[in-house]
Structure formats: C-alpha cells, structure tokens
Amino acid sequence: MAIQPNSTLIGHGFKGELFSAAWWLNHVQIAPLEQKRRPEMQYLIAALAFAGVMSTAQAQEACPHRGDLDALYCDANKDMLADPPKDASKLKNPSTLVFTYTPVEDPAKYENIFKPFTDHLAQCTGKKVVFYQVQNNAAQIEAMRSGRLHVGGFSTGPTVFAVNKAGAIPFAVKGDAKGYQGYNLITVVKASSTMQKPVDLKGKKVAHTSPSSNSGHLAPLALMPGQGLAPGKDYEIKFSGKHDQSILGVGTGDYDAAHVASDVFDRMADRGQIKESDFRIIYRSQRFPTSSFAYAHDLAPDLASKMLKCFADYRFPPEMQKNFDGADRFVSINYARDWDVVRTVDKAAEQAAKK
C-alpha cells in the first residue's frame, strides 16, 4: 500500500483534557521509578492548561469549526485534523528535521535502530535529520505542540492525544506487504504466580506504564471492568514509566502483575532481555494498531508531501526488520478506520475515570 500524501486521515480527541490530566495526577499513585518524572507531567499539564486558556482568549482568527481539537488549531474542513495555518508565514520549512520514536523502551536504542532510516530521510529530503531522544509520552507530545518536533512515531494511545493537543497528522504504521502491524494488551504475571485471571489481581501491586498509553493504561481502564476488575478501585495503579520497566518489575517482584503491549514483551524475549518462560499471560485483548508516524500540521505542504514519499519508498534493512518483528516498510493508514478501536477505548477509559 502506498502512502498517499493527500489522503484524508480523521482523528478523534480526548475530550475534557484538563479533567483527564488532573485525574491522572490526583487519583493514581506514581511508582518510585516514575516519581522523578512527575514534575515533567505536572509541567505539561500546566502548560497545556495555560496555553488553552490563553489561545482561546487571544484567538484573532475566527474558526468556523474546531471539533475536539485544542484551541490552538482549527478544523474548517471538518476532517477532525488540524488544518495548515492560513498565514503562509507560519508554515515551517526547517533546514533540520527533528525526528523521534515513542519511548516504549530505551530511547538511545531506537536512535541506533532508526539510523539507516534517518540517513535515508536526510538524503531524500535534502535536509539534516536529528533524532530527538524523549523519555516519556508527555515530553514527546509537548515537543510537537511547541514546534520542536517535526515528525515521529507515537504510541497507539498517545497518537489520539497528539492529534488533538499537538496538531499531529498520522499517516503510517510499520508493516509489510500484507498490511500494518498490530499488538494486544496483555496482562503478565510470574510463571510461579497463583493468579490465573484478571479478577485475581484485586488488592495486588499492578503496574501501568504511563497515563496516555493505550495498552499500558487506557485499555486496562476500559477493558478490565468487563473482566470483573476495576483499576484504581480494586488495586492501586502504579506507573512504571515504560512497558519494559513494567515487565522487568514483574520479574523482580516489584509488581505482582503488569498491563503491557504484547509486541514489547515479544521483542524483549527475542532479544534475551527476559525469559518468556519466567512469565505467564493471564489476559489478552483484541488487536490494536501499533505506533503511528505523524508529522506536524504546520510543515510546508511541499515538504510534507516530499517527506511522505520518502517514508513510502523506504524498505527496512535486515537489522530494522529484526527489531520490528519482520516489518519491512511504512504502511499507509486511515485514522478514522484504523484508530476506531483506540478511540472507543479512550471514551470508555474516560467514563471509567469519572466513576
């Protein structure tokens, strides 16, 4: 499937973002590994709140339709994505493109994994390309919102947040000739654990990854009640910061269980970081699309089109294929169709958070 530079990609927002952000900070306990990151999350929330108030109050251009987008953006054509700025002087054509990838594991590892592609992107666009290492989803979204990030891979859940709060335009997912990759939410425990199903986690130490993560937080909020388990009520939510830290924490006994993405678990096992036989999966969800690749809404149209072609034409070298479960290319996505299940989870998670 070729990536179409002008294809319509429809997004959906996380309504009531200030409520959701406040709930994350005030109603969940952040584990020791994540305590040092709490000031950054508080900063992002405060910045988003301030920017939202100021941009609403100071908006000088009339916007006929905004939908779920933040007040910084407009959606006049009602495709639920941020429109490019009408003022041509606000379009960006930087000499250096800043690229990043979702911080599901060690960012330095992914800088090396993506180097063949970033070298290709630099040659293809004629611009210098730098890899920006981000430590968490909040920092990644804030970087695109503030204009410091031009293109990158966003985890499944944060993609929705990035569309509405940072003007991200998703266009592709890793995949192969058959289509894009996906993953499942899985709940893992030690192989020696007596726990057999989610309801057995009541009163236990259960790791979530980060507030905006789909499989690491939002999907458990939405799907676990159907399994007889209410996160935040039946157990205290503890954020580890990343999927690999959640999995390793189960292995060391810091957590009794963890909700994580199946692809991260599989990669860690393939790389020898964990022994799959040391763990047992007690829950597996339906399939979700994996990380999206998205660019900033205010990139100059000619640059955006050229960059999308660079993505579409690239074929992963063997080492990249090995690190990405056999994916060999970037596959075009339709956000309306392919992220429908994610938006459904978002809505259910928001409702669960209000109860």
Image: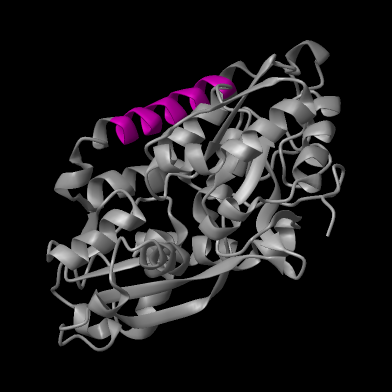
Indicate the position of residue 15 as horizontal and vertical percent values.
53, 49
The residue drawn where x is 30% and y is 48% is 241
Quadrant of the rendered structure where residue 127 is?
A: top right
Image side of residue 25 versus residue 312, left or right? left
Residue 188 shown in magenta: no
Specify start and end residues of the magenta stretch as a single range.
40-55
Tally of numbered tags: 0
Residue 51 shown in magenta: yes
Quadrant of the rendered structure where residue 303 is?
A: top right
Report the coloring of the rendering: one colour
Residue 225 in the image: above or below residue 253: below
State whether the magenta stretch is mostly helix, strand or loop. Answer: helix
Quadrant of the drawing holding the N terminus = bottom right
Decide which of 340, 154 is in the foreground and name it.
154
The residue drawn where x is 54% and y is 23% is 146
Decide which of 63, 185 is in the foreground and name it.
185
Quadrant of the drawing holding the C terminus = bottom left
> From this viewpoint, is residue 274 visible?
yes
Indicate the position of residue 48 as horizontal and vertical percent values.
46, 30
Decide which of 341, 232 is in the foreground and name it.
341
Decide which of 8, 315 is in the foreground and name it.
315
Image side of residue 106 versus residue 191, left or right? right
> From this viewpoint, is residue 297 visible?
no
The residue drawn where x is 37% and y is 62% is 268
Indicate the position of residue 91 as horizontal and vertical percent values.
76, 18
Q: Residue furthest top?
A: 89
The residue drawn where x is 85% and y is 54% is 2
Indicate the position of residue 239 as horizontal and vertical percent values.
26, 53
